Amino acid sequence: MSKNNPFLSAQSQMRTAYEFLAWQYDTEFAKILYPERVIEVNIPVQMDTGEIRNFVGYRSQHNAARGPYKGGIRYHQDVTKDEVMALSTWMSIKCATLDLPLGGGKWGVIVNPKELSERELEQLSRGWVRGLYKYIGPLDDVPAPDVNTNGTIMSWMVDEYSKLVGRWSPGTFTGKPLSIGGSLGRDTATAQGGLYVLEAYMRAMWDTLAGKKVVIQWAWNAGLNMIELIAKTGAILIGTSDSHGGIYDANGLDIARIVELKKNKKSLEEYSGVEHITNGELLELDCDILIPAALENQITSDNADKVRAGLILELANGPITPDADKTLFAKGIPVIPDILANAGGVTVSYFEQVQNNTNYYWSRAEVQEKLKLKMETALAWALESAKTHNVMLRTGAYVVAMKRILEAMKVRGM
């Protein structure tokens, strides 16, 4: 396995935090290091050409001591079993960090969805549900959108699941369109939650975002939402990127132009009058705040010493490896970790579950108010833990989360 294997990274992070809890949870800790179940399924799809093509997918159910498994569905050609296991582990920690009554899970299908027609994509999504519907449900396992999945795909999935079980079951999937039980505020929840945490952190440091130079890796989904949100704070976006590379202007980029390009599915290569750089160079720009919003393992031992940001907010899952974490900590670059920074998505997914199960729906203002309180409270817990143990913020958050999970396992006799 690679030194940047994300599952090994997740285990390493748990072991580091467990040093502060080892006196009472030895039995439980040995179990939390691995998922409770990993399911592999084969999904045959009849392509538009008539041929049958088989797709492989994984579902990792990491821990359900505190509630149903919760986690996104990822469609990507580079999905691996280890990646899905890592993401499910981080979801367990993330839910516990926010004190949500949920466990961690993750889905992943090895596919490049850009190569599929809409009909093929729907057949893949429905086939995935047929292969796994016995293991999911509103009280068992509740998936949501992730990389390359969206509300349309959730609509197909909840429809297929409901047909299979013989009843309408909107609470089995979150991230749905509003017309079938989605929650207001879910579309921007990951970025909005990240902004609430960032603003609260800056206040704790007696500072504001106004005038700060920001770099956001990956102008799509959560990253694009963050670009739009952070512009309203007075911060200055000087760099961003997509799969083709990055753009940089020390005086600030045109947010409206970036949004127009990406919402019309165009490349940032078409943005003229700025410096075009690689994604790697983007991470090394001199800035006040760096926000990785792409995939795992973006900052590693190979480039951590070149990072010049004053602060990093992990909007992606696992963008910094454990070795790189130590380098950044030694350099005095604080990191607001993924399990806290991007937890707005799962928090509003939880709100959607609650609304589905009670058949009572909240206004956008109510959702935002509840999200803000959750994010700020979780940051306060993590900051206090980090201060108490004299560790980085990630480890402080892990200590808080793992104690909650391990205690639940202990009292349940798991």
Image: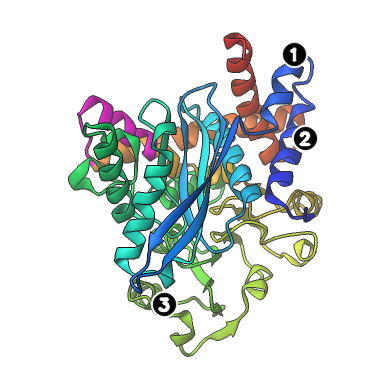
Which residue, given by chain and number where applicable, does mark 1 sit on? Answer: 24
Q: From this viewpoint, which residue is outermost toward the left? A: 179
Residue at point 55%, 54% (across, down): 316
Horizontal and vertical percent for residue 318?
63, 51
User: Which range of residues does the magenta coloring cover?
Assistant: 348-363
The crowd level at tag 3 (other Cα within 10 Å; few <14, some 14-19, many 20+) is some
Question: Along the line of sight, which residue is nearer the eye, 239 or 150?
Answer: 150
Residue that carries the numbered disc 2 in the rendered image: 16
Residue 71 can be seen in this image:
yes
Image: 215 above or below 80: below
The mark found on residue 409 in the picture is: none
* Label 1 vs label 3, nearer the camera: 1
Quarter residue 48 falls in: bottom left
Residue 368: percent from left, percent from top:
33, 41
Tell me how far mark 3 sits from mark 2, CA to CA: 42 Å
Q: Identify which residue is drawn at 72% across, 52% down.
A: 5
Residue contact between numbered discs 1 and 3, judged by CB atoms under 8 Å: no
| In-front residue for pair 107/220 | 107
The answer to whether 261 appears left or right of 365 in the picture is: right
User: Label 1 is placed on what type of residue?
Assistant: Gln
On-image quarter of the C terminus: top right
The dominant secondary structure in magenta is helix
Q: Amino acid at mark 2?
A: Thr
Asked which quadrant contains residue 302, the reply is bottom right
User: Disc 1 to disc 3, how far (Cα)?
Assistant: 54 Å
Q: Position of residue 213 (x, y in %)?
A: 55, 66
First of labels 1, 2 by sequence position: 2
In the rendered structure, are the residues bearing label 3 and label 2 in contact, judged by CB atoms less than 8 Å apart? no
Tag 3 or tag 1, which sits nearer the N-term? Answer: 1
Q: Which label belongs to residue 254?
A: 3
